[in-house]
Each structure stands twice: as C-alpha cells, then as structure tokens.
Amino acid sequence: MKTIDLSRGVPDPRSFPVESLRAMAASALARDAGRMLQYGPAFGYPPLREFIASWFDSAMSNVLVGHGSLELFNFICDAYLRPGDVVFVERPTYDRAITTLRQHGVTIVGIDVGDDGIRLDAFERELKRHRPKLVYLIPDFQNPTGACMSVDARRAMIRWAREHRILLVEDGPYGFLRYCGTPLPSLHSMAPELTLHLSSFTKLISPGVRTGFLVAPEDVVKRVASVAERHYITPSFFAQGIVAAWCEDGRLAPQLDSLKQLYGPRLDTCVQAIERYLPGRLFVRPEGGFFASLRLGARIDEQSLQAAAREAGLALSSGSAFFDAQPGYAFVRVPFCALDAADITEGVRRLADVVDHLNTAARSGKAHATI
C-alpha cells in the first residue's frame, strides 16, 4: 500500500521554476560574480534588499536578508529575549517557532485561535496577567490551522502593541498565496514602525534557494544583523544574487499566479474531502496557504492516532507539537500542496477510517487494535 504523506508542508517540486532559475543564475554571475562569490555584509545582498524594500514599500535600511525566516526569528529571539521573558503565541502555532522559543528559556503563553484568527477576548485576558516582550503571529493562512486574522483583530493587536510597547513579529510566508476571498492588509502595511515582518522565498520559489528576509524598523534590522554576523560571517550572496536576478527579471508575479492555479484546486479538493469523510471536524475553512486542519475531539489520544495512521498507510505530523501545552483534544494538520487530488482524497478517506476505528474502540473501552 502506498504511503500518503500528510506530515510536512512542502511545495510541489513541479512548481519549481527550474529553467528560469538556471537562466538567471548565468545572468547574475555574468553581471556580478565578484560580489556574489565573495564575503559580504550580514545585511544581505544589496540588489535583493533593494527589490524587497520596493516590494514592501520600505527603505533598503529596513531589510535584512538571510538563509531563512526561521533562522531570522532565532536571531530576533537572541537580540531581544532573555530567559523568563513572556512571549504570546497563537494556540496552535508553528511547531518550530515553539521549539525556538523554548530554547531561549522564555515563558510561552498560548492564545486560542478561532475562525477569525487569534481570539481577542483571550488575548486581552492574558494581557491583564502578563506583560509580553514579544507576540509571535502568523496572521495569514496560519500554520497549522489555515486561519486568517480579521482586520479588527489586526487593529487590536496594533493598538495593544502601541499601548504596552510590545514587539509584533509577523511571520508571513503564506500571505501571497490567497486562492479565494478578499486580500487582507498585513500588520506591516498597517504599522511598519511596530512590526517585524518575516517572510521567505521558500514557498514562492523553492526551499533550495535558502533565502528568507526581515522587514522591520532600521534599529531592529541593525540589531538583528549584529546577531546574524555572530552566527555566520556572511549569508549566501550566491543564492541571494540568483533570487535577485530572478525577481528583477519580472518572474515573481507570474510565479505567484502559477502557484495559485496549482494549489487553489488542491485546497478545494482537500476541503471537499474533509466535509465528505470527516464532517464537522474542519478547524476553519482556509482561503489560501498550505494547510487545512482538523479538531478530532478528546476521545482520541495522539499515540494511538499515530500508530493507527501508520497501519493505514498515512504519515502524520505530531498534532500536540503545535501547542504550547496539551490541547485536550486530538489535532491534525493536513498539508495539501504537494499532493495531487487523488492522494488528497484518499489520504482524508483513510484518516476518516482511522478516526472511526479509534472512536469505536474508545466507546467500547478497548485499546487500539489493528485496523
């Protein structure tokens, strides 16, 4: 039986713009080999910084380019956090962000996510109990739920950040991958003086280009760049030079259109399969990004779910890893971008069989038995 991998949110290799990258690599080297192949400043390759600054309506001094947005988040934590500091995150949120924060010894406070993103009532309640140094948010097509933060919630976040002098870290790799609905303004576009916007070319070009970036106030960029310089002498100007040439050649806009045409129907297939085989379990109806997610209830424990899924030919990520504390229910993230329609539908159908089997076993008081 073929294993269907629902464990990782990776792009479809068929989306990689191989030919244009090959051409742009040759063009970039012909134009600027001396700089691309040499050591350079920790702020990143200047032409790419200029492109990103123009893209985000910012100055070049507001842009830092590194090897990936997660690494840059780690540098932000190094620059601004100390053990015992309080950080607010969405619950659930990106599992690797939780890991990074734990490595810095901070106190993580999770705020539940609903249909419109982070719950404002819960956030305000926790704000009365704690003074967070930083709030880490994925406002658009959140990893892992697929939820989008409403405009009202974004305004509230900005208001609270101003009142309480909180750093807002906006992790935004999925914001350009909207397949339906109305685009929402980024936190950065609404309050650039307060927002540390992280993003990456990983989901837009390929993971192999290893190019992420930070758009933030100039003093933040300088502070984070000093941390970056301690970790590596120079970022990869070779990779960044190719990405810069590719973007400057006008390749980004048609690539985004191509990704939307490829992934949009897969999201529709995923949601339709969930509504057919697992009705009532969809966490929120995503309008873009890489993920849908499921709330399976309290009867199912994760160890039994993982074991039964393996028997059914499914690979799942750990649902509890997306939470700062045990959620009290089984959670499953469902990545859909790297799978074709048949595998998406079959994967959800198998998962539904697993859930039915485990619920039946729980009702009967029996331990998990082989499916």
Image (cartoon, rainbow, N blue to C red):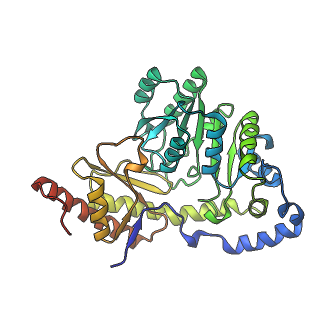
Q: Nearer the viewer, residue 104 or 249?
A: 104
Residue that extends furthest to the left in the rendered view of this protein: 364
- Quadrant of the drawing holding the N terminus: bottom left
- Quadrant of the drawing holding the C terminus: bottom left
Q: Nearer the viewer, residue 333 or 100?
A: 100
Residue at (39% x, 67% y) in the render: 344
Residue at (29% x, 64% y) in the render: 307
> Is any atom of residue 91 visible in this view?
yes
Number of marks drawn: 0
Q: Which corner quadrant of the image does residue 205 belong to?
A: bottom right
Residue that extends furthest to the bottom in the rendered view of this protein: 1
Residue 306 vertical position relative to residue 330 in the rendered view, above or below: below
Residue 231, horizontal then vertical, whole percent = 71, 49
Residue 187, horizontal then vertical, whole percent = 60, 37
State left or right for residue 98 relative to residue 234: left
State left or right for residue 78 relative to residue 286: right
Residue 38, horizontal then vertical, whole percent = 85, 61
Residue at (73% x, 50% y) in the render: 65
Q: Which corner quadrant of the image does residue 192 belong to?
A: top right
Residue 25, horizontal then vertical, whole percent = 78, 70
Residue at (41% x, 24% y) in the render: 125
State left or right for residue 74 relative to residue 227: left
State left or right for residue 370 relative to residue 282: left
Residue 134 vertical position relative to residue 257 in the rendered view, above or below: above
Residue 61 vertical position relative to residue 212 in the rendered view, above or below: above
> Is any atom of residue 285 visible in this view?
no
